[in-house]
Image (cartoon, rainbow, N blue to C red):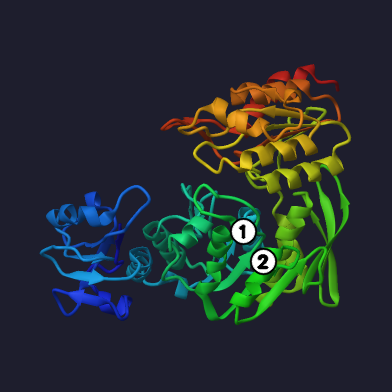
Amino acid sequence: MQTCPDSDHALSLRQILDGVELFGGDDIRITGCNCRSQSIEPGDLFVAISGTVRDGHDHVAEAVARGCAAVVAERPISTSVPVCYVADSRAAYGRICQGLAGDPSRKLKAIGITGTNGKTTTSYLIASVLGHAGRRPGVLGTIGCFDGVEFEETSMTTPPPDQLARCLGRMVRNGCTHAVMEVSSHALDQSRVAGMVFDAACVTNVRRDHLDYHRSINDYRMAKSRLMDYLAPEGFAVLNADDPTSVDYLTRIDGPVLTIGVRSAAEITGTLIEQHVSEQTFLLTAGSDALPVRTRMIGLHHVYNCLTAAAVGLAYGIDLATVARGLEAVEQLPGRLQRIECGQPFSVFVDFAHTPDALAGTLQTLREVVSGRLICVFGAGGDRDRHKRPLMGREVENGADLAIVTDDNPRNEDPEAIVTDILAGFRSPAAAEVVPDRSRAIARALELARPGDGVLIAGKGHEQHQIIGSGRHHFDDVEVAREWLYECTSGFPA
């Protein structure tokens, strides 16, 4: 539910939704709205949304019985309260929520980041660059919402419109100057950011993902591109010149664009100089200026994340030296190639990689810095894109010396069926070990590791639960790995 911060000041629905059809009154004045009929309170506006599971238009009577003052709908309904008809209820709900929150995105410089991989890390890198330049950024994404004062976990990369508006509103009240936020393809397709205005739009890369939701890879790409529709007239975009889909988005942008790249010509480029298991150095170049940047997070994908953050910082007039300090200050993020160091003579990393492209990139990064074997523990989520599972298996077989296939979040699917889908991508499926219990799979990988080896625990990253059926059970890859390593530290050679 979204309410107006000033409950004594009602907002005009006709002003929020310009050009709408109103029946039953000249205007509708509102102080609160909700798209869940069971949560309606007297005086609220009910927005009927056609969802993937239920259709809000079928629950108008319940909303009216609970005291709603008016209804927003997409199709004709019979009811005793005023009705506002719109072409897209989702977009209307987003605009209404933002309006009731005081349009916070217009009081902040909102920076949106979309892409298949790298959104979370890039958002924290941008926030760090801004912070080192004296700005006060808020951050919103997969890990949670930081409103400038407090951190709150969220259940979605981009939360529903009412939660999103409240988070941005808190950023304004807490004195934030910028809002750095991840924008998922689901959020763009469902118009969760409707009513927002972005000062900057960044695209990290567009690979294959979420085809359980989007009907095709083209639909997925189009969803990502919709972030550009929310750019302010004076706003700017940052695109990856090495990513073909990102380059294609140039046709959707009328305003300024900065490009970043490692292989292609671009305004901001990066050249990897040296890479080790615990740090790397790359040369950051912007025009005629260049500086070496040493980061504790490794991998070519991290160079791309840094370049996107650097482009945003430079666009805001931050000098290159300050940009570099901001990039170097982000030493580790939960579940983003996170090192687990408990005195063991081999490397252990936990990473959120759950797509074929992300797995391939992460394994390639580790291959370049690990002297011994690579052991990868991974699975695939249930009730999600089945077609990517064999592709994930193929990438792990190609990139690791030993694959241990285990459960991820099976949800309502048969875990054995998920494993079967993964193994279908292996040329030699018998070479992979199958250990369904994730704790035992992690223990098995650590037991097999020898000095100089590298263990990658992939798929769940920062998540602290495992979803089996409809239940959520506490499970943390980092916690499980550390517990095993600490128990066995005495057995490692000095």
Give 111 or 133, whichever is nearer the viewer.
111
In the rendered image, residue 99, in percent from the top left (x then y), is placed at 35, 71
Residue drawn 70% across the image and 48% down it: 357
In the rendered picture of this protein, how many numbered marks are placed on residues?
2
Local crowd size for mark 1, using a 10 Å CA cut-off: few (<14), some (14–19), many (≥20): many
- SS for tag 2? helix
In the rendered structure, which amino acid carries the disc numbered 2?
Answer: Ser
Residue 39, image x and y in percent? Answer: 24, 51
Q: Measure the C-alpha gap from mark 2 to mark 1.
A: 9 Å
Which residue is labeled 2 in the image?
A: 246
Task: Judge left or right: residue 99 versus residue 362.
Answer: left
Which kind of residue does numbered mark 1 sit on?
Answer: Gly
Residue that appears at 15% across and 55% down: 61
- Which image quarter is the N terminus in? bottom left
- Dot 1 falls on a residue whose secondary structure is loop
Residue 353 vertical placement versus 453 (above, below): below
Asked if residue 45 lies left or right of residue 230, the reply is left
Q: Position of residue 302 (x, y in %)?
A: 74, 54
Q: Is residue 130 left or right of residue 343?
A: left
Q: Nearer the viewer, residue 278 or 55?
A: 55
Residue 272 shows in the view: yes
- Quarter of the image where the C terminus is located: top right
Do labels 2 and 1 touch, CB within 8 Å?
yes
